[in-house]
Amino acid sequence: MANVRDFRTRIRSVKSTQQITRAMYLVAAAKMRRAQERIVAVRPYALKMLEVLSSLAARAEAAKHPLLARREERRVIVLIIASDKGLCGSFNTNILNRARTFLDELRDREDVQVDLVGRKARDWFKRRAYKVRRVEVDLLKALDVPKVREVALELVRGFTAQEYDAVYMIYNEFKSIMQQRPVVERLLPIPLEIFEQKHQDAGPTTPEDYIYEPDDKSLFDRLLPRHVGTQVYRALLESGAAEQGARMTAMNNATRNASDMIDALTLQMNKIRQAAITKEILEVVGGAEALK
C-alpha cells in the first residue's frame, strides 16, 4: 500500500508536468496570435484571387493556358498538410483520417500519389501502402516563402507537363482556437465552382467577356502560377494557425487535468496521514490504559 512519501513523490511529478503543460500553452498562445494575424492578412487576398481567376477561367478557353486544361482525372496528386510535432490533441488524427477517406474515394483512379508536409504525415504514410511522391518537413516551422513557391511551382510544372491530371490539397482550416476543420480543396485545374455559384446567384445570364490588356495569355502566364503559390501558402498558414489553436486547447486541458489529479492525490495522501495519526493516538491511549 502506498504511503505518504509515495504520494508526495507523485504529487511533485504531476506538478512538474503541469508546469510544462502551462508553459507549452503560453508558447502556443504566442505563436497562435502571430499565425492568426498572418492568416487574417493573407486570407482575403487569396480568396479574392481565387474568385477572380475562377471568373477568368470560366470565360477563357482551356487552350489558352495549360493550367486551365480539364482532363479526365486518371492521375492525381494529393498534397496533405499535417504538423511536425505532436501534443496538439486530435489535430493530426482528424487530418489523416480525412486524407484516408479521400484517398479511398480515389481508388478507381489509374495513379494516385501523395505529397506530404509534416513529420506526422510522413510517419503515418510510412506504415501504409500509399505512393508517396514528395515529403517536406519543418516547412511550417518558419514558412519560408521561396520554399513554398518551390513546392507550388513543382506542382504547376507537373500539371503543365501532363504528368498528372488534378491536384488536391487537404489541410486543417483555422476557424477559431476551439475549432479546426479538415478541408479538401482542388488546386489544379483552376476551380470554376466559385464563379459558377456566384453567377447562378446573380441569375441565368451569359457571362460577359472582356478585352484584356495585355492579352489574356500574358495575364494567365503571370497570374495562374502566382495563384497556385498563394493558395498553397494560405493552406500552410491555415494549418499552422489551426495547429497552435489545437495545441492551446490540448495543453489547457492537460493543465486542468493535472490540477484535478493533484487535488485527488492530496486528498488521498491526507486520508492516509490522518489514518496513521489516528493509529498512533490509539496506540498511545492503549498503552496508557495498560499501565493503569
Image (spheres, rainbow, N blue to C red):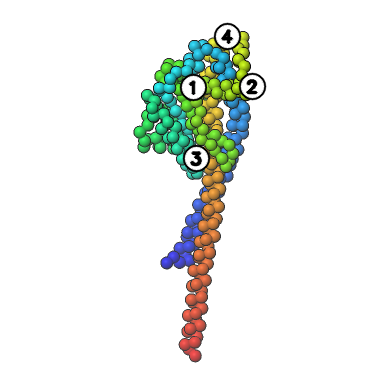
Q: Quadrant of residue 218?
A: top right
Mark 1 or 2: the one toward you: 2
Mark 4: few/some/many CA within 10 Å (<14, 14-19, 20+): few
Label 1: state its secondary structure. Answer: strand
CA gap, disc 1 and disc 4: 22 Å
Kindly identify which residue carries mark 3.
91
Q: Earlier in the sequence, mark 1 or mark 2?
A: 1
Q: Quadrant of the N terminus?
A: bottom left
Residue type beneath disc 4:
Asp
Looking at this view, is 24 or 213 the one in front? 213
Looking at this view, is 213 or 165 the one in front? 165
Kindly identify which residue carries mark 2.
202
Across the whole image, how many numbered discs are drawn on residues?
A: 4
Kindly identify which residue carries mark 4.
215
Mark 3 or 2: the one toward you: 2
Q: Residue placed at 51% from the left, 78% from the top?
A: 281
Residue 82 image point, x, y percent: 47, 35
Q: Earlier in the sequence, mark 1 or mark 4?
A: 1
Q: Earlier in the sequence, mark 3 or mark 1?
A: 3
Mark 1: few/some/many CA within 10 Å (<14, 14-19, 20+): many
CA gap, disc 4 and disc 3: 45 Å
74 left or right of 178 in image: left
Kindly identify which residue carries mark 1.
188
> Can residue 280 be seen?
yes
Residue type beneath disc 1:
Leu
Residue type beneath disc 3:
Phe
CA gap, disc 2 and disc 4: 27 Å
**Does residue 250 sit above or below 215 in this rendering?**
below
